[in-house]
Structures are given as C-alpha cells and as structure tokens.
Image: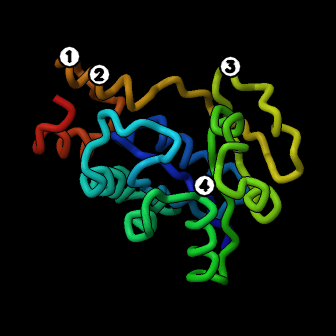
Amino acid sequence: MKIGLFFGSFNPVHIGHLIIANYMANYTDLDQVWLVVSPHNPLKEKGDLINMYDRLEMAKLAVENTQNIRVSDVELKLPQPSYTIDTLAFLHEKYPEHHFSLIMGSDNLVSLKKWKNYELILRDYHIHIYPRPGFENAELINHPSVTITQTPLMELSATFIRKSFKEGKNVQFFVSDPVLKFIESKNLYK
C-alpha cells in the first residue's frame, strides 16, 4: 500500500489540513494518508503548542468518518526531538509491506536542506508537495523525488485559528464540529 505521511503539530487540526489530506488520498497515487501528530518540530518554537495528546485526540475526531485518512501517534512514542528520517526508518521497519512518502507544503521544501539526513529522504522517499503562496520556486522543486500536486490553495493556518479563539471570534467551518466541541469542552486556546 502507498501511504502518504502528513506530519504536523495539528495545533489544532483544521479544515485546510483535512482538504490537503483528502486531496492527497483521492487525487494522487496514494492509497492512504496518515496524519502524523508531531510532539514538537525541532525547527519551530514551542509557542502556543498545547498537550500532544489533546492534539492527537483532535486529529482522531477530525478523521473519524473517513475511508482513507487515519491518524498516527508514532512520533509520540519515539525519542524527542523527533526527526522525520528517524520516523521513516521506524515505520519502514514496522510496516515493510507499505511504501511511505511524505506530504508537505512548498514552504517546507524550502527548508528541507536543514532537516536531519535530508539527502536520504530525497534518495529513498517520494515527496508530494501542496502549493503554498510565495513558495513556487523552491530550490528542490524539480528534484526527481518531488511531485507538485494541484491541491487547492489554502491560506488557513492554525495560528489564525488560535488567535481567533483568543479573541473570542467564531471559528465555525474552520475546524470540524467534533474538533470545535473538543476545544470548547477543554477550554483550549483561550
């Protein structure tokens, strides 16, 4: 099975993430997409990062009724900080019957050379790229391991959603109803 790994903080998971995952699972050669909840991206500040288990639960709620999108907690069980190459090696060993590839925005392609063992990622794995405004000419965009998709452009961000929660604004339709209920029940992002 071809599985696309969509890594993220998912702080919170929102409609933009789900649109990208759905597109990748249904409009590319991938059979499934796994949302891989990351405890903390080593290249980002922790900032407003909430508990990783709350983020995991929100991701599960967001995809509970989908056919070919699931959630993985693999990075929560691995040593931290979590590096993509280590997660890929672990998954390859645990699921040798699957072929894993990465899903990332063109903005992440720009910083890929900062990743641990990025050369091995490019050598051994395929990368499905969804476009992000302003990052159309990333250095590795024409690499043979990279495929640019026609995923609908999404300018929705978790930062915007967290800010909206803090300001008491309505975020209905930006996050799924089960995720919104979970956030409200735990009084997150206030």
Quadrant occupied by the N terminus: bottom right
Look at discs 2 and 4 and give the one toward the viewer.
2
> How far is the residue under mark 1 from the one under mark 2?
6 Å
Identify the residue at image location x=29%, y=21%.
163
- Residue 151 x, y percent position in the rendering: 65, 37
Graded by Cα atoms within 10 Å as few (under 14), some (14 to 19) or many (20 or more), the crowding at tag 2 reads: few
Residue at image mark 1: 167
Residue at image mark 3: 134
Amino acid tagged 2: Lys
The part of the image, by quadrant, that contains residue 98 is bottom right
Labels 1 and 3: the sequence-earlier one: 3
Q: Would residue 130 be visible to someone looking at this image?
A: no
Amino acid tagged 3: Gly
> How far is the residue under mark 3 from the one under mark 2?
23 Å
Asked if residue 186 is positioned above or below residue 168 in the image, the reply reads: below
Secondary structure at badge 4 equals helix
Labels 1 and 4: the sequence-earlier one: 4
Return the residue nearer the eye: 95 or 21: 95
Return the residue nearer the eye: 25 or 135: 135
Residue at image mark 4: 25
Graded by Cα atoms within 10 Å as few (under 14), some (14 to 19) or many (20 or more), the crowding at tag 1 reads: few
